[in-house]
DNA sequence: ACTTTATTTCGGTATTTTCCTAAATAACGA
DNA sequence: TCGTTATTTAGGAAAATACCGAAATAAAGT
């Protein structure tokens, strides 16, 4: 779960997730939305993949990234467990 | 909002928030839950305060920290805006 | 086989974060 | 005022993160 919060900590990565809300996108199409070098974006993709927030699938010469909703929902649940009134599910 | 996600990125800070769920606690009482030097914890408190996730109040010789629910709820809303099906509130 | 396109891995630098010890500040009680 | 307790600020070292350009890999078309 720490991986998820680490991933969410960077604005670029949060924006990537938002972009993916509209459906799967290739690394290149995603990169076009940022003023950063491709390798830099590639690094961000890796962080998101490590956190399991996105999955990747090779489609010929391009690579498609797509949101992994279930993990995002887990992060939501973890946050809720902090907001939630009484102690219960620790170790997040 | 970026400050909030930065603050949430560290496990110790998330645990501090959870501890505060049970009610306000002094810096010292919080520190007792960790194997870290007091100044280190003090730094974490500052990060949480900067993100407005906690407030502090001097009580004689001790300082009481307490959760700021409203900001935590904003973070929750920001996460929801990523999970949420269709594009709407960008810039998180 | 060669070239092109899409993407990642490598090597390295700059910045940020985390943590520590020592010293400073704040409030209190004797 | 002096000493004690609680906490923060200062200064600095080590590790992690973010970024880039150059080179490597993968798939496809010619």
Image (cartoon, coloured by chain):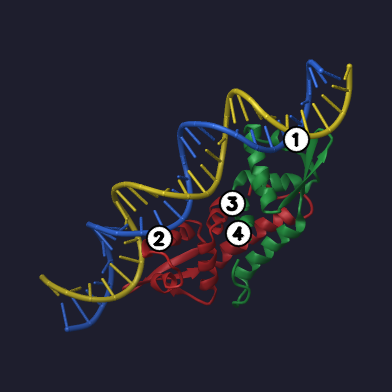
Chain colours: A green, B red, C blue, D yellow
Instruction: From the image, state whether disc 1 or disc 4 is nearer to you.
Output: 4
Query: Between marks 3 and 2, how big is the CA–CA gap?
Result: 20 Å
Residue at position x 37%, y 65% from top? B38
Residue A9 tag number: 3
Q: Earlier in the sequence, mark 4 or mark 3?
A: 4
Residue at position x 67%, y 57% from top? B79
Residue at position x 55%, y 70% from top? B18
Query: Between marks 2 and 1, how big is the CA–CA gap?
Result: 42 Å
The residue labelled by disc 4 is A2
Q: Residues within 10 Å of mark 1 (few under 14, many from 20)?
A: few
SS state under label 2: helix
Q: Earlier in the sequence, mark 3 or mark 1?
A: 3
The residue labelled by disc 1 is A29
Q: Are marks 2 and 4 in contact (CB under 8 Å)?
A: no
Could you tell me residue A62's position as x and y percent?
79, 35
In the image, are marks 1 and 4 on the same chain? yes
Q: Chain of mark 2?
A: B
- Write down the quadrant of residue A84 in the picture: bottom right
Q: Chain of mark 3?
A: A
Pick the residue in front: A70 or A83: A70
Could you tell me residue D1's position as x and y percent?
10, 70
In the image, are marks 2 and 1 on the same chain? no
The residue labelled by disc 2 is B40
In the image, are marks 3 and 1 on the same chain? yes
Q: Chain of mark 4?
A: A
Pick the residue in front: B31 or A15: B31
Query: Between marks 1 and 4, how big is the CA–CA gap?
Result: 28 Å
Instruction: From the image, state whether disc 4 or disc 3 is nearer to you.
Output: 4
Instruction: From the image, state whether disc 2 or disc 1 is nearer to you.
Output: 2
């Amino acid at each position: 779960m720490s991986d998820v919060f680490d991933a969410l900590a960077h604005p670029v990565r949060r924006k990537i997730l938002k972009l993916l809300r509209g459906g799967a996108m290739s690394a290149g199409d995603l990169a076009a939305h940022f003023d950063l070098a491709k390798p830099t974006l590639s690094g961000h993709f890796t962080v998101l993949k490590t956190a399991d927030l996105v999955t990747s699938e090779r489609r010929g010469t391009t690579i498609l990234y797509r949101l992994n909703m279930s993990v995002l929902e887990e992060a939501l649940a973890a946050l809720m467990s902090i907001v939630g009134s009484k102690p219960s599910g620790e170790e997040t």
